[in-house]
Image (spheres, helix red, strand yellow):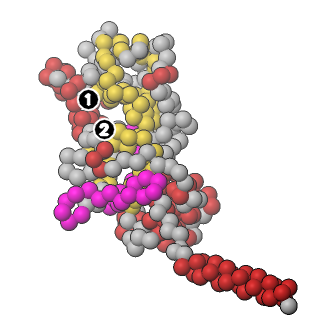
């Protein structure tokens, strides 16, 4: 009898433990995905972003450790750019790599809240254009009025006017009102107001299309800042014929090469204008033996790279 009682007690004890275990399982809360992908998946206005991330095989990446900063286009932003749900679902396999780079152009390594975005600065995205296999694309940040990115997309703010940070377990999300396409030389020249004089001169000489495209690219552009156009330079330039104005502008461009600052040759460099200049460190000597300083380097574009200079370079063809 004792043996039977002992067995019964053991069975009831086991059943009791089993019931408690089942009860604990029933009371467990479901796991919440607080990663960037998880938060975006639960946002009613980021459905197309999530669809695009899955299509480009990036959803898992943005569930990873990170940290990442994602400038997340809303559904309306995707629709405005032509990326409807149907377009994304039926995107040809050959077009997926391009979509992936566009999406990566919205991602920055590190967790950067709005207070960490500096006016008139460049940050590096995770995207690559065709110009460089090593230097990822630059994004220009303007915080003069809200946060403007590459001159084409703005961070959406709350009704109170504060920049909207969505904190994830592996970074931060900023919703934006437009898809940020891969920037060209012209994109950065027009987005950064410090290049506004150069941008207007390029437009006047019909060089915008050239520097926006891929023919003769990649380009390395030694771009004069607005301050480079002092009174003497402006007077000289304005007195030139149209052909010589084009010669001055193309003298700042090297075609067929994406030359980063750490790889600028010390031998004479042939320009798009077919003239030459030399570079020693950060100092350029033009054909008129004038010295010009590189003051900002390696602004990476999809079709080339920009180095800002503090003076206008002059070829011998200009008096």
Vertical placement of 131 versus 244: above or below?
below
Mark sitting earlier along the chain (2/1): 2
Image marks 2 and 1: residues in contact by CB distance under 8 Å: no
Q: Is residue 100 magenta?
A: no
Kindly identify the residue that appears in the image at 41 percent across and 14 percent down.
Answer: 281
- Mark 1 lies on a secondary structure that is loop
Element type where label 2 sits in the image: strand
Dividing the picture into quadrants, the one containing residue 219 is top left
Task: Tell me if 236 is positioned left or right of 116 in this view.
Answer: left
Crowd class of label 2 (few under 14; some 14 to 19; many from 20; radius 10 Å): few
Mark 1 Cα-neighbour bin, 10 Å: few <14, some 14–19, many ≥20: many
Residue of label 1: 225
Q: Residue at x 49, y 45 (%)?
A: 126
Vertical relation: 133 (above or below) 20: above
Relative to residue 127, is residue 193 drawn left or right?
A: left
Answer yes or no: is residue 11 visible.
Answer: no
Residue 280 rendering spot, x and y as whole percentages = 41, 12
Task: Please name the residue shown 47% across and 54% down the image.
Answer: 170
Disc 2 target residue: 121
Residue 131 horizontal/vertical position (percent): 51, 38
**The residue stretch that appears in magenta:** 158-185
Question: Quarter holding the C terminus?
Answer: top left
Q: Quadrant of the N terminus?
A: bottom right
């Amino acid at each position: 009898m004792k043996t039977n009682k002992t067995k019964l007690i053991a069975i009831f004890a086991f059943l009791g433990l089993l019931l408690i275990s089942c009860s604990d399982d029933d009371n467990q809360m479901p796991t919440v995905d607080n990663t960037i992908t998880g938060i975006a998946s639960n946002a009613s206005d980021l459905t197309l972003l999530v669809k695009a991330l899955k299509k480009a095989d990036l959803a898992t990446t943005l569930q990873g450790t990170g940290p990442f900063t994602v400038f997340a286009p809303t559904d309306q932003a995707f629709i405005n750019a032509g990326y409807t749900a149907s377009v994304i679902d039926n995107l040809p396999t050959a077009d997926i790599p391009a979509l992936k780079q566009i999406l990566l152009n919205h991602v920055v390594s590190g967790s950067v809240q709005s207070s960490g975005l500096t006016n008139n600065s460049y940050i590096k995205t995770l995207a690559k254009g065709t110009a460089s296999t090593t230097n990822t694309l630059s994004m220009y940040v303007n915080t003069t009025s809200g946060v403007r990115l590459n001159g084409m997309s703005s961070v959406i703010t709350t009704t109170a006017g504060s920049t909207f940070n969505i904190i994830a377990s592996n970074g931060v999300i900023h919703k934006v009102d437009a898809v940020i396409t891969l920037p060209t030389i012209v994109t950065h020249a027009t987005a950064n107001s410090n290049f506004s004089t150069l941008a207007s001169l390029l437009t006047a000489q019909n060089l915008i299309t050239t520097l926006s495209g891929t023919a003769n690219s990649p380009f390395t552009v030694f771009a004069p800042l607005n301050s480079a156009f002092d009174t003497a330079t402006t007077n000289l330039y304005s007195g030139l014929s149209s052909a010589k104005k084009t010669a001055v502008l193309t003298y700042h461009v090297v075609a067929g090469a994406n030359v980063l600052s750490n790889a600028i040759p010390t031998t004479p460099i042939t320009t798009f204008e077919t003239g030459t200049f030399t570079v020693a460190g950060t100092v350029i000597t033009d054909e008129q033996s004038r010295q010009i300083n590189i003051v900002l380097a390696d602004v990476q574009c999809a079709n080339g790279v920009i180095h800002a200079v503090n003076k206008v370079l002059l070829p011998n063809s200009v008096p």
